[in-house]
Image: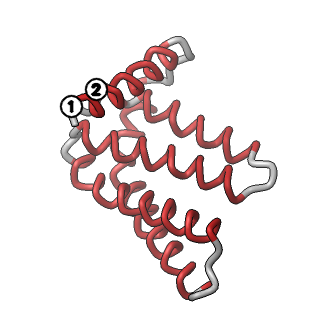
Amino acid sequence: MALRKKTIDGYIKQVEDYCKNLPQVSKDVRDFISRVLPWYALLFGILSVINALSYLIKFGGQMTIVTVMVFALTLLSGVLLLVAFSRLQNYQYAGWRFVYFSVILSIVKDIITTPIPVLEIILGFVGIYLLYQVRLYYK
């Protein structure tokens, strides 16, 4: 377990080092993002779980492997956001990590479901960039 955590933290640190070379947003924008992020997590967590459950209603017993993957990724992404909510309100690093992994799962889901996911990938990387802008707010 410790090895896995170290590997994940190493990956997060590696991306953080890359993001440090990118232009920084102003302190006012970072403050705004850190205040809004818990509510973003709550809103989109609820919407993601509802969306995932709609797959069950829509496809029922006729789910393909792709549909099952999309269902699982959407549900997991939503649950991560919901779990992050209270931690983000308390500026805990664990909440930031949950949102980070939710964004990664969303990018993977978009790659699976979109024929040419260029816009989705760009938006995902913008989301990661903005997350790293507020990373130091979370301890």
| Residue 66 drawn at (x, y percent) | 64, 65
Q: What residue is rendered at 53% in x and 11% in y?
A: 21
The N terminus: image quadrant: top left
Secondary element type, mark 1: helix
Q: Are marks 2 and 1 in contact (CB under 8 Å)?
A: yes
Residue 2 numbered mark, or none: 1
The residue sitting at 36% across, 22% down in the picture is: 10
Element under label 2? helix
Locate the C terminus and report the quarter of the image it occupies: top left
Q: Amino acid at mark 2?
A: Lys
| In the depicted structure, whether residue 83 falls above or below residue 123 | below
Numbered tag placed on residue 20 in the rendering: none
Q: Position of residue 106 (x, y in %)?
A: 55, 52
Which residue is farthest right?
116
At a point 22% along the width and 54% down the height, the residue shown is 86
Closer to the camera in the image, 133 or 48: 48
Farthest residue to the top: give it.
Answer: 21
In-image side of 62 versus 118 (left or right): left
Residue 59 is situated, as x and y percent measured from the top left of the image, at: 62, 84
Residue under pointer 2: 6
